[in-house]
Amino acid sequence: MPNTAPILMYHRVDVVSDNRNTVALEQFRRQLQFLHDNGYTTISMKALYDHLTADTALPAKPVLLTFDDGYEDNHRHVLPLLQAYRMKAIVFPVAQWVGAACGWKKNPAAERLMNWRQLQEWQAAGLEIGAHTFSHGRLSTMTDEQVAYELRQSKAVLEEQLGRPVDFLCYPYGDFDARTGQHAEQAGYKAALGIFNGTGQTQRYALPRIGVSSRTALWEYRLKVSKLWKAFVAARRLEGSVKNIFR
């Protein structure tokens, strides 16, 4: 497979950040402004897939923006900014919890998720929607039958409600094992995303992503979307290995 583009992982974007997974609205705006001012082009997941499988051309400085879970603030804050900057992104809602609270969390009422109308508006704006399983469970802890259900049911529900194919999958918690990619392929997904650092060559059902959090300073964001990030991660891993040897 050809080398891939940096894939950035977001969750929530709100006016004020009250946890690590919530990027402050002004922080997010500055990140988009940086991409805009420095010649980066946001691409679709389909464009990345076509590049990986057919070696189609990508822009000189591509970047893919992804949003996990489908929070309501993605519609309220992220969508208008993406439209203003004419940028692309993909959101991965959890099919069972669309329009509800985060049923997989300890305090679900605190975080609302997009409803079907909001997801349709996201889609109508030319942005992509992928699957994040049916219930947001940990796939590596499930039986084969449970994994198959999670992947197939989420795809079926999203496609029925949105009227379009759902070709891409994002693993909850970045959690997957040797079986998961096979199940994803059998369920009809074309590619799947995990959560681990990297921007290099990889498997189609285990594409790496780079996390963006409330703690990501702009200098670090610039590093994460640059070609230097892969070398930076490799150096950090080497440093950790050396420290372990001499402990």
Image (cartoon, grey):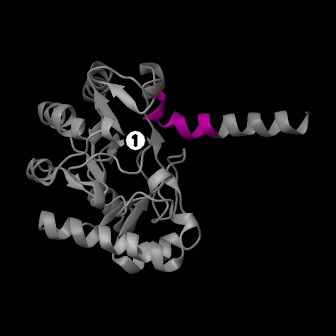
Q: In the rendering, at what x and y percent does residue 205 appear?
A: 46, 65
Judge left or right: residue 100 versus residue 106.
left
Residue 225, located in which quarter of the rendered image?
top left
Q: Nearer the viewer, residue 62 or 172?
A: 172
Disc 1 element? strand
Which residue is labeled 1 in the image?
A: 8
Q: Work out whether residue 53 or residue 133 is closer to the camera in this orientation and state it.
A: 133
What amino acid is labelled 1 in the image?
Answer: Leu
Tell me where residue 147 appears, x and y as whole percent.
Answer: 46, 72
Residue 225 part of the magenta-drawn span: yes
Q: Give the answer, above or below, for where 15 lies relative to 158.
A: above
Magenta region: which residues?
223-233
- Going by the image, does 63 lie left or right of 98? right
Q: Is residue 7 left or right of residue 196?
A: left
Q: Residue at x 34, y 75 (%)?
A: 152
Determine which quarter of the picture holds residue 63.
top left
Name the residue at 13% across, 47% down: 118
Q: How many marks?
A: 1
Q: Nearer the viewer, residue 129 or 138?
A: 138
